[in-house]
Amino acid sequence: MIFIDNNGVTDPTLNLALEEYCLRNFEGNKDYLLFYINEPSIIIGRNQNTLEEINHEYVNQNGIHVVRRISGGGTVYHDFGNLNFSFMTDYSFKSLNNFEKFTAPVIKVLNNLGVEAELKGRNDIVVNDRKISGNAQFSSGKRMFSHGTLLYDSKLSEVANALNVRMSKIESKGHKSVRSRVANISEFITNKVDIDTFKSLILKGLYDEREDFETYRLTEEQWEGVKKLREDKYATWDWNYGHSPKFNIKRARRFQIGEIDLRINVEKGNITDFKVYGDFFGKDPIEDFEKLFINQKYDLQPIADIVNSLQVNDYFGNIDKSDLIELIYGADEDANPSKII
């Protein structure tokens, strides 16, 4: 395992650019670990609608960064009390969506520090059923990373102030439970230390797990590549906000794999815009899925034909094709989705 030194950078646009640069450019057949701490920022999931995830006025008034990442999952809040980790490895089908594999070493170190952490649900590390870490993944086909947050001493009140919580999440759990289920790791440590010391303790614990740990520092040329990626992508409005398409159909549903939110524009019976938002995890770019529906007739059979021709799990995770067809077109009294497949 090789630890990547990020030179103490706290700019989220640069840290996310660094993560992607390392994934795409560093040597294969080697495992890397990256730590970073960001200034107050909202990190948007790859497939989410930024304008519907943030409290725009509050974000502007308080100078909070808004940056989209390349991995799926939901929106998270970062600040100086939040430690982020990223494990980079060769791609493996068995590793994709296997959050247990990548969180296990972190959980073991937390346990050794007296924090009774465990992996629970889809991708969360919890203590006493209170979330202290959320995790997400991305694959380039050859390489992948699994990254996550560690809420150590974050200003949790800012989460509610900076984010607009989706009603579909509130309805199933209640607003009070959404707030109360998040906690800081510092609450569970007897001898509280600052986050830099906590970072050192986590790193030391991971070092003890592997004898081949070493530290890597990027060259000036590599940092220039990171900065170019930042300027071309992570610091741009197009990437972080993007253009919201006009639509006249909205369909959203929460599945075990996460929420899927569809925005479809239909003119004269044909689909002219098709956009997918959500906090699901998929291997393949959702843009490839969206393009398949443009200029297609908005009717049950053409939609079913498209969905049935695909490996939809590559885009969304484990979801039934019949459920996806029903979401796109809606229930039809005379049609049984199971008969269409």
Image (cartoon, helix red, strand yellow):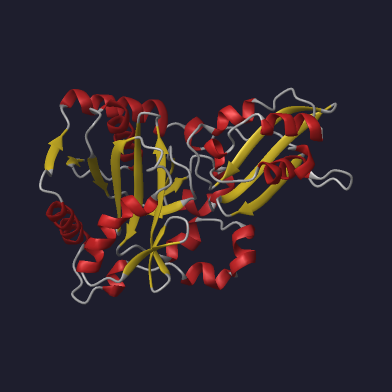
Q: Quadrant of residue 65?
A: top left
Q: Quadrant of residue 104?
A: bottom left
* Direction right: furthest residue: 334
Front position in the image: 127 or 82:
127
Pinpoint residue 224: horizontal percent, then vertical percent.
24, 25
Judged left or right of residue 195, residue 262 is right
Pinpoint residue 124: horizontal percent, then vertical percent.
42, 59
In the rendered image of this protein, does residue 147 appear above or below residue 122? above
Front position in the image: 100 or 187:
100
Front position in the image: 22 or 67:
22
Q: Quadrant of residue 336?
A: top right
Pinpoint residue 7: horizontal percent, then vertical percent.
18, 41
Judged left or right of residue 93, residue 278 is right
Total count of labels: 0
In the rendered image of this protein, does residue 58 appear above or below residue 189? above
Pinpoint residue 6: horizontal percent, then vertical percent.
21, 40
* Direction bottom: furthest residue: 190
Residue for point 41% across, 47% down: 136
Residue 298 appears in the rendering: no
Residue for point 62% across, 31% down: 310
Residue 118 appears in the rendering: yes
Judged left or right of residue 302, residue 122 is left
Residue for point 49% across, 68% down: 179
